Amino acid sequence: MTDKVLVFDVLGDFGFFKTPEVTRATLSFPFTRTSIIGLIGAMIGKEKNSYWEIDDPLGNSEIAIQLLNLGENSEFQHAPLTVNYAHTKYTVNIGGRSGTLKTYLSDGEKRGFVTDVKLDLLRDVHYRIYYKLPEKEIDQELYDKLKRYLKNNWSIFPTYLGHANLLADIIYIGEYPIKKIPNDIERISSVIPVSCIDQNYLNILERKVSIIMNIPIRMEMKDTKIVNTFGENFILPGGKESNLKIKVKNDVDIYSVEIKIADNKSEVLNIIFIPNGKDLISEEI
């Protein structure tokens, strides 16, 4: 069976993937694998978070992410925004603006509004997603369904980038064959998981690049609730890092894919699929 990928673009005016380390000034990850899995789930009508069950084919999918909107310095454009969050769950009445505006809950408790929360939104988001054909025939039904929805521009639920009001457009690029290439020092176009890099070569890279820490790649479910989030460290190719060569571990596969572009031209790219994090859950257990 020939290895293949579905290639599609995800675009949005704004995106926001909250980092857990800060509260008042709220920063965003540049991307997360979890958000892309959720976006695909919304498109094909999967119940929210159901794909994080341990054997779900969507949660275990092999995807690679290419960042198409990085600036010359390998940075996203940002748009600061200050908002007020209101606690609205179980609200039965809203008080007037005398002093502090409060929400009145059914149990009589008054909760004030959180004021002046600063969001650091991503601006002009543009990802290219590579979704690999599963090896197991039982999981290929999901691949075929996603291909059908992409080709017809269908979506069961709205697709968005982190927050429900930050809507995303999906553009189908096509289905392309991929092939493994020699596991040597190669230029990589997709985001690069640090866990995939040869340790000796990583020691050299750490003096040349910035590493984004603990970007979410998977969530753990217990009794229909999310109980844990697992992260991975990444190098983002682009800008001055776009010419870096990477040596990966012996058990990591690099794939080459030829994408058709305008005027009957094509572009050959090297990609690495992001670990799905399933083995991290097994280690926790």
Image: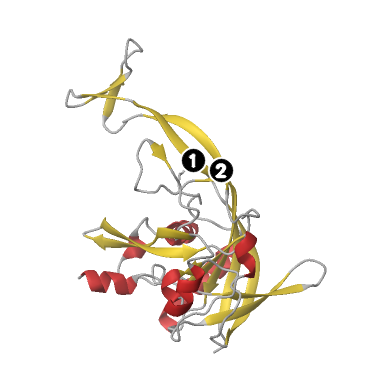
Instruction: Tally the numbered discs.
Output: 2
Q: Nearer the viewer, residue 271 or 264?
A: 271
Considering every residue shown, the one lying at the far top of the view is 98
Mark 1–mark 2 distance (CA, rounded to whole Å): 6 Å
Callout 2 amino acid: His
Residue 5 horizontal/vertical position (percent): 57, 75
Q: Earlier in the sequence, mark 1 or mark 2?
A: 2
Q: In the drawing, does residue 164 fall left or right of residue 112?
A: right
Quadrant location of the N terminus in the rendered image: bottom right
Considering every residue shown, the one lying at the far right of the view is 263
Q: Tell me the residue that label 2 is attached to.
A: 78
Q: Is residue 48 above or below residue 7?
A: above
Residue 62 seen from this side: no
Quadrant location of the C terminus in the rendered image: bottom left
Q: Is residue 254 above or below residue 205?
A: below
Q: Nearer the viewer, residue 34 or 236?
A: 236
Task: Determine the secondary structure under disc 2.
Answer: strand
Residue 134 horizontal/vertical position (percent): 47, 79
Q: In the drawing, does residue 114 fall left or right of residue 119?
A: left
Mark 1 and mark 2 residues within 8 Å of each other at the beta carbon: yes
Which residue is rendered at x = 58% and y = 73% of the image?
188
Name the mark on residue 120.
1
Crowding near the residue tagged with mark 2, few <14, some 14–19, many ≥20 C-alpha atoms within 10 Å: some
Name the mark on residue 145.
none
Residue 241 horizontal/vertical position (percent): 60, 64
Callout 1 amino acid: Asp
Residue 39 seen from this side: yes
Which residue is rendered at x = 34% and y = 47% of the image?
21
Q: Nearer the viewer, residue 46 or 7?
A: 7
Task: Determine the secondary structure under disc 1.
Answer: strand
Crowding near the residue tagged with mark 1, few <14, some 14–19, many ≥20 C-alpha atoms within 10 Å: many
